[in-house]
Image (cartoon, rainbow, N blue to C red):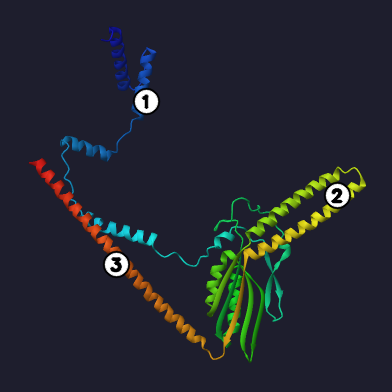
Amino acid sequence: MKPPEDTATIERDLHAVDAALAGGAARHDDPVARELQELALALRADAPVPEPAFAQDLRGRAEAGFPREQKKRRLPRLKLAPVAAVLAPSVLVVVLVFAVGGPSPGGGDSDGGASGGSSVAEAPSAGGDSGGRAEAAPDASATDSLSQPPIERGTGFAPGRRERRIERSISMTLMAPDDEIPQAADDVNRVTARHGGFVLRSELDTGDGGSTGSFELRIPSGRLQGALRDLAQIATVGSQSQTGQDVTRDYVTATDRLQAARAERRSLLRRLEEADTDAEAEALRARLDLVAGEINGLRGQLRDLRLRTEYAIVSLDLIGDEDGNSGSGSSGAFDDAVGDAGDLLVGFAGVLIRVLAIALPLGLIALIAWLAGSGLRRRRRESALA
């Protein structure tokens, strides 16, 4: 039970608050009561005022006793659970079939990602050849950049690793009518330039004995597959072969030897600064000359290895056919495409049949389970209402 003085103080404060709200001013003599009056006035001043329309609507609803609002009739919901129960297993099986057993995307090279990680240091420069056609050759002065980090030792030469250095060589023969050989040669130059490569050597002969062409291309290894696809679209492919040689060990060995030679040169320079006699200084200078020659040789070897691995060698021959029989090759290519399309449809139909053979029983089982669950829930509701 509260003491009488507390009760009197509370009643005094309440009367003071009522007086302030009625009079609109805080005039009580007691500082605590006056502070309560000011607080009450501030709260009333900050109280939100409802919109007139809302206040009128609320007043009307209060006078009417807050009647219940009529609920809007909702459209019956479609029971999609049976459809989902049938389609979900089918979709799952299709995804699994194409994710696990589907064909792998073509156009890639097993070693393409291995050598495409390092930046290309060689740059092509324009030049001329004996046939009068413009060609490009690598600029040796631009390949002297050794700023990229050396390959780490002790990591092994596992396939697909970034440090692998693969030297690639491709031989390709394209056949076209004699009158189309010059246009095909121009297309070869355009495709090579579009993929960042350059023509190292080119020859074109359009004499009376028939039209022929010969090209030696350098194409970046990372864009090799796309370039080969575009070259194969220029004319009918007569033959094509690819070879690869792993020169990673040579590259690593040359890099290590270059680092060791540079370290030795730094040591010799320090010793030369501290040499006491002319004979000792002369011997150190002679050794420095030998080390400098070794460094220059190793740098040239690394430039050559980079050029051979960053750029694939593509030897392309254009062979003309004065009888125009290459048109039959186009017809044969069209027939092959039609046959491939038919094989693809047959394969897709086989996959679809397998998917349906697995999905239909699973869907039927899911549908039966859903119907059984619906019946069980309905009986429980009926028993609860009874």
Query: What residue is drawn where x is 17% and y is 53%?
Result: 371
55 sits left or right of 129 in the view = left
Residue kind at label 3, given as amino acid type: Ile
Observer-nearest residue: 318 or 385?
A: 318
| Count of marks, rendered view | 3
Where, by quadrant of the figure, is residue 86 drawn?
bottom left
In this rendering, would 35 be left or right of 374?
Answer: right
Disc 2 or disc 3, which is closer to the eye? 2
Q: Amino acid at mark 2?
A: Leu
Measure the C-alpha gap from mark 2 to mark 3.
Answer: 81 Å
Image quadrant assignment for residue 1? top left
Which numbered disc, 1 or 3, marks the residue closer to the eye? 3
| Residue 42: assigned label | 1
Q: Residue furthest right?
A: 278
Pair 1/2: label in front: 2
Residue extending farthest to the left is 386
Disc assigned to residue 353: 3
Looking at the image, residue 238 lies above or below residue 354? below
Residue at image location 33% in from the left, 27% down from the top: 44
Rendered location of residue 370, percent (x, y): 20, 52
| Mark 2 lies on residue | 284
Specify which label sits upstream in the sequence, 1 or 3: 1
